[in-house]
Amino acid sequence: MPTRALVALIVLLLIAAACGVAFGSATLTPAELWRALAQGDTGTATSIVRDVRLPRVALGALVGAGLGMSGAALQGTLRNPLAEPYLLGVSGGAAVGAVLAVVLAGAHGLLVPVAAFAGALVAVLVVLVVARAAGGRGDARLLLMAGVVVGAFANAAIMLALANAPANTVRGATWWMMGSLADADWFQVRSLAALLVLGGGALLWMAREIDVLALGAEAAASLGVEPDAASRRVFLWASLVAAATVSAAGLVGFVGLVVPHLARGAGARAHRGALVASAIAGAALVIASDVLARVALRPTELPLGAVTAIIGVPFFLVRLRKLA
Amino acid sequence: MIRFEDTAVRYAGTDRDALGGVSFEAAAGQLTAIAGPNGSGKTSCVRALLGRAPLVRGRVSIGRDDRAGMDARAFARRVAVVTQREEPAFPLAVREYVALGRHPHQTPWRSDAARDASAVSGALARAGIEALAERRTDTLSGGEWQRARVARALAQDGEALVLDEPSAFLDVAHEMALFELLASIAATGHAVLMVSHQLNLVARFADRLVLLDQGRVAADGPPAQVMDGPTLERVYNWPLVVTRDPAVGAPTLVPLRKRAGGPR
């Protein structure tokens, strides 16, 4: 991709990250910020910056990067501009896991993220099994349809689980589903970073294969790629990356769908560039959205998933206009 | 080089073979054409070669190797295939698209950049699309796109080139240029196998013509021998005559109008 566009995306990410550290429910002066960052005294400002805002910005960057990469890989592999991890059962499965954890055990500690991650993985496996049973193994169209069906089933399961649950349980589950970085801590950051290095690395490793898969199954076969096996592989890794982000921050919608289009609009056409650009743009979008979610109605926080959509839609509309 | 031996294909959910046991060879150093009416099994031959059609009998071999035992990448290093239809899900620059022809020669993090770049430039030049190198694939005309696809196959740099109706969408000049290019590639020792409906051009350029009818080989041999009026009339189920082109001397098929008693 053009170097200028890459530099512009990195600058946007840095600006978003700086805002993420500078702004929040508490108002800190530039001097307090500087002391907290550079000198590390033991005051409240340092605690806010180092234990709340920095992990929050870092987690937001990782969530956005993961969703952006996952969406770019899935859109190319499934040859569908609407493909994104949340359309393909990952979010539904994660939500079922999280809601069951909230309903059955109450929301505490690591239980919800672990249950969400497990739910997402189960959903992904079910999608693969359903596509295989339909005879398509890694057929892109069948993976897409199986994902939509599993997602619909998951939504029904969530409604059933919440139908007779107490009001505070419904509220907790609903908040989780709207996405939030409010509980970010360094443990979460380290866990997600480890999973993303693994999953994101695998997707980058497969970037050329994704370029070839984007030409269609027969063309891929003529270029030395087993299309079914390769599609399944990309689907699995992209879903793993998305599942990891969902377990860390709940459902942060729209990023996986819109960010790859923005990356391509910035000139990233081949998938190695598109994956990198989507990671940077996704990180910037989630951090910026989180800043807005924190400060728009201070001290109340807005649901992150809604804000990403509100910020993302205008970018997407501009891109659509260019495509038309 | 590419040999079909009693190759039979049947697709799931159908009750007849799309290919009912065909045997023929596309030899190195020759331009071999496959022709036949719609649904006669031409594209199934290409799919069988790609490993994308279920073989119920027989085999396809590349040199001495059974295609069924070859991994996809090893196959693609030896045989470049231009399928009938293809559309990138997201547009690429023509040069990026042609460079995908180097995929079988690359590993995820390693490639011979100099060799790849020279193969891509050479392919763009041979397909006559150097001027389009920086254009996006979604801005090309049908004919330009078809030439970009041929360039991608040339960049693959295999021993054999297989093309399924490569001259669809091409104007007369580009169609002639493509046939000249394929004949010149065959002349350098490559096996070139093409599916084509352009029997009159096939008669002038191909060394061998395989005529398919309802999944079987109806005739196979030099075009002058296969282009026999009664055989073609039976296979295509349409009145026609085969004459000799007065300008170039090649057999020429002239389909007739179906008017009872009127001028044809």
Image (cartoon, grey):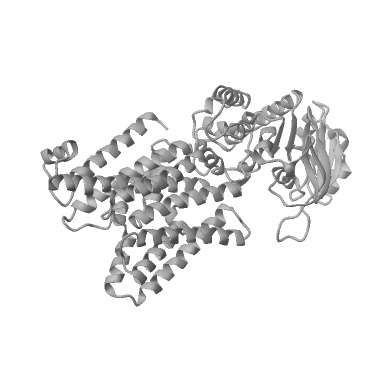
In the rendered image, the vertical position of residue B113 relative to residue B10, given as above or below: above
Quarter placement of the C terminus of chain A: top left
Which of the 4 image quadrants contains residue B193?
A: top right
In the displayed structure image, the side of residue A259 where residue A77 appears, left or right: right
Q: Seen from this angle, which residue lies furthest bottom? A: A164
In the rendered image, the vertical position of residue A145 relative to residue B114, given as above or below: below
Residue A153 in the image: x percent, y percent?
47, 67
Q: Residue at x 42, y 47 (%)?
A: A195
Q: Residue at x 71, y 50 (%)?
A: B53
Which of the 4 image quadrants contains residue A280?
A: top left
Residue A281 in the image: x percent, y percent?
35, 42
A50 and A4: which is toward the camera: A50
In the displayed structure image, the side of residue A21 where residue B108 appears, left or right: right
How many numbered marks are there? 0
B240 and B9: which is toward the camera: B9
Residue B187 in the image: x percent, y percent?
76, 24
Q: Residue at x 82, y 40 (%)?
A: B210
Q: Is residue A318 visible?
A: no
B213 and A57: which is toward the camera: A57
Residue A163 in the image: x percent, y percent?
36, 75
